[in-house]
Image: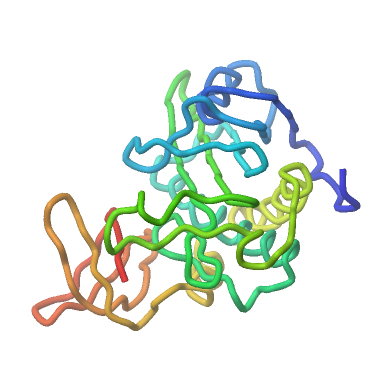
Amino acid sequence: MSDRPWPAGVGRSLLPEVDSTNAEAFRRAPQCAGPEWILAATQSAGRGRRARPWASPRGNFYATYCMQSRESPQSLALRSFVAALALHDALSAVTGTPEALALKWPNDVLLSGGKVAGILLECQSGLGRQTLAIGIGVNLIGHPDAAQVEPGATPPVSVLSETGQRVTPEAFLDALAAAYARWEATFTTMGFAPIRSAWLAHAARLNEPIRARTGTTDHHGIFETIDNSGNLILRTPQTRLAIPAAEVFF
């Protein structure tokens, strides 16, 4: 454990291996008395967005924050921005390089322009409440080969490759849990407005040209902002689009 205080009322489980931390979170949810962080040393079936496999070598960070709520699915989905801000703070704390970090809509964190972390939100309903699993993967010491990434996608990097610093998953969890607790408190007491403002302050390519792919359609335009629902607002030559889900390319 580090010298960072662990958030009160939040569980903490450290596991040698799971199929995926999100899947483990849903298995544990019926017995959970409160929110819990689940950290695994490795995953045998890790996954990213759109069910893509997520490579899980030992030494990188694989964790899920599991919580139960009676909020709407739309409100729970905004936790992706809460998690992104927590990741930004935790990475800033452990590397001391906040100027090198940026947040890429919808769910990635960039370090020196490369993807260092990703977020996967999944939700299950039952007994009048929602179980939310916020899966987080961070390339602490290794990253996939750039040749494995789709052409035009953000190349992967690691904390070690970009900063020369070795951070253990356990130490990173301590920093992340503390940061997440702060932003979760902001969200629950003040709503999305301060989360949105803070996220935009760290947004990658804001007011610059991007490409947003929805299904098989590419939209080219200026990344203008995110709205009060977390949608990407893209200004194209023809119109102004509110995009709820897409893959973004620079």
Q: Position of residue 25 (x, y in %)?
A: 57, 26
Check the image and report above or below for 185 versus 101. above
Count of picture labels: 0
Q: Position of residue 161 (x, y in %)?
A: 61, 62
Nearer the observer, 40 or 142:
142
Residue that lies at the very extreme toward the right in this rendered image = 3
Q: Quadrant of the C terminus?
A: bottom left
Check the image and report above or below for 175 versus 127. below
Nearer the observer, 131 or 203:
203
What colour scheme does the image use? rainbow
Question: In the drawing, does residue 228 fall left or right of residue 28?
Answer: left
Q: Residue at x 48, y 60 (%)?
A: 115
Nearer the observer, 193 or 199:
199
Check the image and report above or below for 113 versus 213. below
Q: Position of residue 206 (x, y in %)?
A: 39, 78
Q: Position of residue 203 (x, y in %)?
A: 47, 73
Q: Residue at x 73, y 61 (%)?
A: 165
Q: Residue at x 57, y 71 (%)?
A: 101
Check the image and report above or below for 108 versus 36. below
Q: Quadrant of the N terminus?
A: top right
Nearer the observer, 41 or 241:
41
Question: In the drawing, does residue 149 fall left or right of residue 156?
Answer: left
Question: In the drawing, does residue 140 fall left or right of residue 237?
Answer: right
